[in-house]
Image: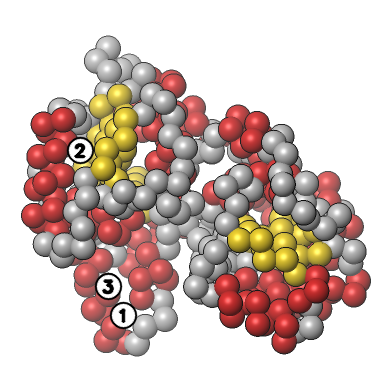
Amino acid sequence: MVYDNKLKKVVFIIKNLQGNGAEKYVTTLSKALHAYYQAECHIICLENIIEHEIDNNIKLHIISIGKSKNHKESCRRVDEYITNNIGTPDLVLSNLTYSDKVMRHSTLPNVFHVIHSISSIEHYGKKGLFSRWLAKLKLRIIYSKKPSICVSLGSYDDFKKNILTKQKLHVIFNPIDCDIVTTRAKEETSLILPPKYIVHVGKFNEAKRQDRLLRAYALIQQQTECDLVFLGRGHTLDACKELSKTLGIQSRVHFIGHVINPYPIIKHADLFVLCSDFEGLPYVILEAVSLGAPIVSVDCPSGPREIIGDEYSHCLCAADPRDLAEKITTALHQGDYFTPRLQKKFSMKYAADEYMKLIDSHQ
């Protein structure tokens, strides 16, 4: 692929930089595109909530659109801002449903939606028949105007099957900044942690299923020296604390809360566990892999199996507390056997190459 000499302008649209998955994708990919192709990258947040570090070469913009439900008018404001302050972009990447509702109306060239999750499960998986139909219809309307990029093969298969868009679909895996992760893992942490521990990192919500891990740990707590450590915050946290008391394991379970730098904790863990009902492409597993931590994950749709690969499929287990407990026990005794290697397709260089090819193919 031969690229022209003109430096590319890439604009990322996202509600805010508060979460973990899509937000890390935005900060990491923008850094990669600038580092490898000197692309002029801009991040536009629709709320002024910033919790992630942004590379000094990336320009941050805040366009507060409030809680307006007039998405077409909000998009007009965003398009006008981009045209007047950035110029005509070579690529616009809209992230997460909030932004997608707005940017579907964009008149800018080369606008893509980035699909970070399993759309059918996230938006209507547990709803009744009519509510499912209505949610699916709304999604088809949102994604009927622009092409989309899926961050995993699992999200691609689900999107293609359930959204039924006639727009083009692409798959480009999320990149991880291994240098940042490994460097920050060397930092000291002021947290007082147990000598040996199993760690889970993620929001406390219904999808992450921390309750599944609590029930699994209750089955093996008397057989292991490791305590259980949770990093994260969210609306199911209190329910999980109560469950730990009900299971009689509260003295060995540590709810640390939100941690700005979780990498030293992941690096020194005896085992990292993911227990979700579904994912898109979980960054936290990419981070654990890059740090060489032993890993056990529920084989949920989608992402864990694609990250871990066939060679390390024994790191995966069924979405059942007993199966998870058995897998954790095995991994704690055979840690080296549960440390998968990071595949090339998750590197920053690989992602930057793929996005530059995308820009070239649409010009």
x and y percentages locating residue 294 in the rendered image: 76, 50
Q: Secondary structure at mark 2?
A: loop
Q: CA distance from mark 1 to mark 2?
A: 31 Å
**Judging from the image, what secondary structure is the residue with disc 1 in?**
helix
Q: Residues within 10 Å of mark 3 (few under 14, many from 20)?
A: some
Q: Residues within 10 Å of mark 2 (few under 14, many from 20)?
A: some
Residue at 72 percent of width and 62 percent of height = 229
**Residue 127 image point, x, y percent:** 37, 83
Q: Would you say 24 lies left or right of 333 here?
A: left
Residue identifier under label 1: 132
Under mark 3, the amino acid is Lys
Q: Is residue 308 visible?
A: yes
Please say if 20 is above or below 233.
above
Name the residue carrying label 2.
110
Q: Give the residue at mark 3.
A: 136
Q: Residue at x 90, y 64 (%)?
A: 225
Q: CB under 8 Å between callouts 3 and 1?
A: yes
Which quarter of the rendering shows the N terminus?
top left
Compared to 229, does 22 lie above or below? Answer: above
Q: CA distance from mark 2 to mark 3?
A: 25 Å
Q: Residue furthest top?
A: 5
Instruction: Work out which quarter of the rendered image holds the C terminus and state it.
Output: top left
Q: Amino acid at mark 1?
A: Arg
Mark 1 or mark 2: whose residue is earlier in sequence: 2
Q: Quadrant of residue 119?
A: bottom left
Residue 219: x and y in percent read 81, 78
Q: Are marks 2 and 3 in contact (CB under 8 Å)?
A: no
